Image (tube, rainbow, N blue to C red):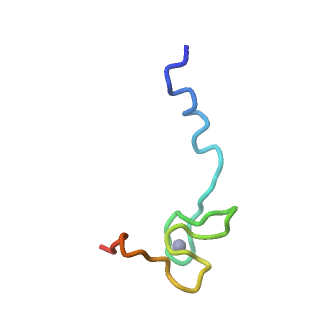
Amino acid sequence: MSNGTAVMGKMNSKKVHIRCRRCGHHAYHIREKRCAHCGFPAPRLRSYKWAKAK
Ligand SMILES: [Zn+2]
């Protein structure tokens, strides 16, 4: 009876990212204690040349 969406109920069960206080994005990883967007608390902003700022 599994139609492929049985795991959908487990989505969002763990809160991994919270709002970053530096960049404001919902990208601060709680367990890693690091923002996935700006790299907080790293002193330099996380940036890659393949991720061009708009
Ligand atoms: Zn951030």
**Extreme residue in the front direction:** 49
- Asked where in the image residue 47 lies, by quadrant, the reply is bottom left
Query: Camera-side residue: 1 or 26?
Result: 1
Q: Residue at x 50, y 74 (%)?
A: 38
- Residue 31, percent across and down? 70, 62
- Asked where in the image residue 41 lies, by quadrant, the reply is bottom right
Relative to 46, residue 4 above or below: above
**Extreme residue in the bottom direction:** 43
Looking at the figure, which quarter contains the N terminus?
Answer: top right
**Extreme residue in the left direction:** 54
- Residue 16, percent across and down? 62, 56
Looking at the figure, which quarter contains the C terminus?
Answer: bottom left
Q: Residue at x 52, y 63 (%)?
A: 26
Left or right? Give the position of 10 relative to 54.
right
Relative to 34, residue 6 above or below: above
Q: How many marks?
A: 0
Relative to 31, residue 4 above or below: above
- Residue 17, percent across and down? 59, 59
Q: Residue at x 60, y 81 (%)?
A: 42
Relative to 51, residue 4 above or below: above
**Extreme residue in the top direction:** 1
- Asked where in the image residue 11 lies, by quadrant, the reply is top right
Query: Camera-side residue: 28 or 21?
Result: 28
Q: Residue at x 54, y 78 (%)?
A: 22
Left or right? Give the position of 49 relative to 24.
left
- Residue 33, percent across and down? 67, 69
